[in-house]
Amino acid sequence: MYLTWLDSNSWLLELNNQRILIDPWLVDALSFGNLDWLFKGYRPQERTIPENIDLILLSQGLEDHAHPPTLKQLNHNIPVVASPNAAKVVQALGYTSVTTLAHGECFTFNNQIEIRAFPGSPIGPTVVENSYLLKELATGLTLYYEPHGYHSPQLKQFAPVDVVITPTVDIALPLLGPIIKGYKSALEVAQWLEPQVMLPTAAGGDVIFEGLLTKVLKTEGSIADLRLLFKNNNLLTQLLEPNPGDRLELQLAKRALTN
């Protein structure tokens, strides 16, 4: 398994010779509803869009997960697996092969990789987006991805999981509380799934954020804090801190095939 963090929530997963692009924001700026004064993210230099993508995986329909300028530049014939809200985004852009996964549904890609959707991040009062458990069928190797730190107890029946990608720090708004849950949430999912490796997402990297919202957002916790928390709870999970653009080869011990 190879993983490349592309900043923010964007990842390139290479599994069983399949290249899966997750929640890509790679070009242009990021804003929500074109409200740049409220929130805007940008990079000093744009990321190169990876070549030879076999599948696009989208967890949410919001712009930081289904980024329209990036999706416009990708080949619209690349198959997409998406939450219902994200599926609407790529369908409107003219993508030709879109599989929508509701919570509990499963899709097998190229007879090699099983993708199972779980409840993920709540978006507003009525919408819950997706998290995903990916499984390489030949080996049973598994990876779980949830970009806001909202983990469904349904995951427990699929433990152990080899790799977890999730936030490791809290990002909170005054009075409203965390909008991204790390730290204790990362500890909880590590206790459930006993991953060999955990990687942080959503925070850090080369992205520059500006706007009114950034002045009130508060970040709490660190990788060092989480490592200590894991140690105090007798967890052997290795916490990695990838640099944006670095291609990591994960050396994982073989475990018994999971469900």
Image: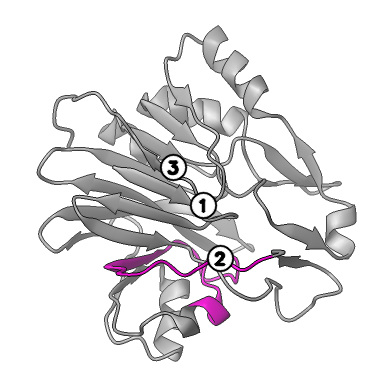
State the image coordinates of residue 24 (x, y, percent, origin top left): 49, 66
Which of the pair 157/227 is nearer the observer?
227
Image quarter in which the C terminus is found: top left
State the image coordinates of residue 195 (x, y, percent, origin top left): 37, 27
- In the picture of the structure, the residue carrying the numbered disc 2 is 47
- Under mark 1, the amino acid is Gly
Q: Which residues are magenta?
A: 45-70
- In the picture of the structure, the residue carrying the numbered disc 3 is 152
- Under mark 3, the amino acid is Ser
**Residue at the (67%, 53%) spot, across then down:** 206
Going from N to C along the chain, the mark reached first, 3 or 1, is 3
Which of the pair 207/158 is nearer the observer?
207
In the image, residue 53 lies in the stretch drawn in magenta? yes
Q: Are marks 3 and 1 in contact (CB under 8 Å)?
A: no
- In the picture of the structure, the residue carrying the numbered disc 1 is 245
- Left or right of 157 on screen, residue 126: right
SS label for mark 2: loop
Residue depth check, mark 3 versus mark 2: number of the one nearer the observer? 2
